[in-house]
Amino acid sequence: MALTTVPFLALFNSQPAATLRDRVCAMLRQAIANGILPAETRLPSSRLLACDLSLSRVTIEAAYSQLESEGYLSRYSGKGTFVALFPERAVRRSLPTPVPVLSARGQNIIAAGGCDDPPFPRAFAAGSPDLRAFPQRLWRRLTQQRLSAGGESLMGYGDPLGLPSLRQAVAHYLGQSRGVRCTADQVVIVTSSQQALQMIALLLCDRGDRVWLEDPGYRGAYHAFHSNGADVCTLATDEQGAIIGDDAPPRLVYLTPSHQYPTGSTLSGQRRLAWLDFARRSECWLIEDDYDSEFHYDGRPLPALQGLEERARVLYVGTFSKVLFPSLRLAYLVVPDALIEPLRRLRSLMDGHSAQLMQAVTADFIQHGHFAAHLRLMRQLYASRRNLLIDELNNKLAHRLSLFPHQGGLQLTVALRAGGERRLTQQALQHELLLPRLSPLYRQQPAQEGWMLGFSALQPAELIAAVNKLARLSY
Ligand SMILES: Cc1ncc(COP(=O)(O)O)c(C=O)c1O
């Protein structure tokens, strides 16, 4: 390894870098990249180089240390400073960061903007259960019991269709409380309703296939079908729920029958039967998203569309995000026998299955009766919060807002009487009030302006304070 005769010094003056240290670094990087300084070349001592460049030794030391940390140089005490064995790696590191070019599908996905999940607890984030009211200690105890009683069996790979005990518990619960007709085999456990919709889109929908979606409607459903290339068409809604369209029949129809998202209406009994007839005649499938039917406050909700007739052409979707907690990441699909095996294969190619331990604890929670008790309590709690919100709005904002139907759910949709949604939402943010906007959920224009006011996660004092802030906006 020869001592260099500093053939690279001429490069120093051509470096545009700001500081002297940066110029020394840039000079050496360039000399290494150009092969003027090959691997393992010994560099002059910092004292010598400082002298040649008329700089201080401290500057050269700082430059050598910088280049050592970048992988260009190796320094050995008592031996000197050398060009590293593989300086090409460092040279490569200094190339500009490559940017992947998105596929047309990728561009389609990001253009849609993604879904925003509600922060907790924050007035008026929509759709969040009250996590402060969740029985944490009981949940911890059930988890501990599962781990103690042979947790290893839950640590291996699991069935892509879900843990049998949870499928059984869900089938029983849905039959009893929602009138869903199914066996445990027809229940498929997934991570979220969103995953269920993605899987349905992947299995049943080719590029250009027609899918009907309620308008206004749930953005998550729109994203699932749009990102898979479907031709997403809108369905108007009225006080009886979604109206059957009269253009060319679709392959899939997405509906929220118990609690239309976001208008809060309920699909009437007559309309339900009409949709089932329509599906049979046009050989399409209805997707019933029953996302928060557990929270009906004025009487019982109508039973699920899926159970209204034998062999209905319905794919039923439900979630534990609202009734337990969202980070549990457990939801379910109820499907006809012919879809069970395709779903098993698809899930095995996606992420395999949902976490086994959490599936087991959820099954125990349901089977030991805690789920029914928790639902009863939450229904009472949320009903009282909904009533409080309605009173507060009627007292303080009746001339500004009008209320959509509000028999159930975790949020109350309100219409702004005189517009100004975007401006007022911005203004509210400055006062730390989050107002989920209504108009972006409409595809057909003109869109109704308003907000979806989440109430379920807010304690009474928080609700009152939030309505006071809402009333102080400059309408
Ligand atoms: C209509 C509708 N479906 C499904 C969900 C969410 O369920 P998940 O968390 O299981 O994706 C929501 C959440 O707000 C929703 O509004």
Image: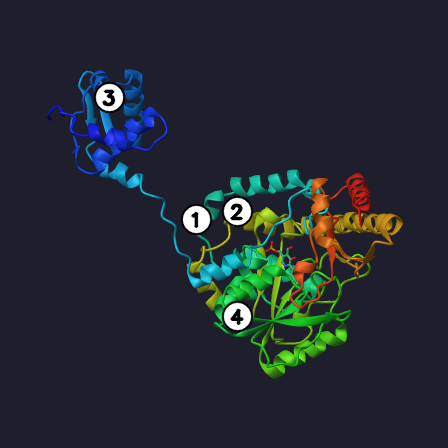
Q: Is residue 449 left or right of residue 366?
A: right
Q: Nearer the viewer, residue 180 or 234?
A: 234
Note whether residue 185 is visible: no
Q: Is residue 408 above or below residue 40?
A: below
Label 3 C-beta lies within 8 Å of the nearest ligand 1 atom: no
Dot 1 lies on which element?
loop
Q: What residue does disc 2 label?
A: 357
Tag 3: amino acid:
Leu
Ligand 1's quadrant = bottom right
Is there a contact, CB below 8 Å, between mark 2 and mark 3? Answer: no
Q: Which residue is mark 3?
A: 53
Secondary element under disc 4, as helix, strand or loop, is loop
Distance between the Cα atoms at labels 2 and 1? 10 Å
Residue depth check, mark 1 versus mark 4: number of the one nearer the observer: 4
Residue found at x 87% / y 52%: 394
Q: Which mark is residue 230?
A: 4
> From mark 2 to mark 3, how far is it between C-alphas?
66 Å
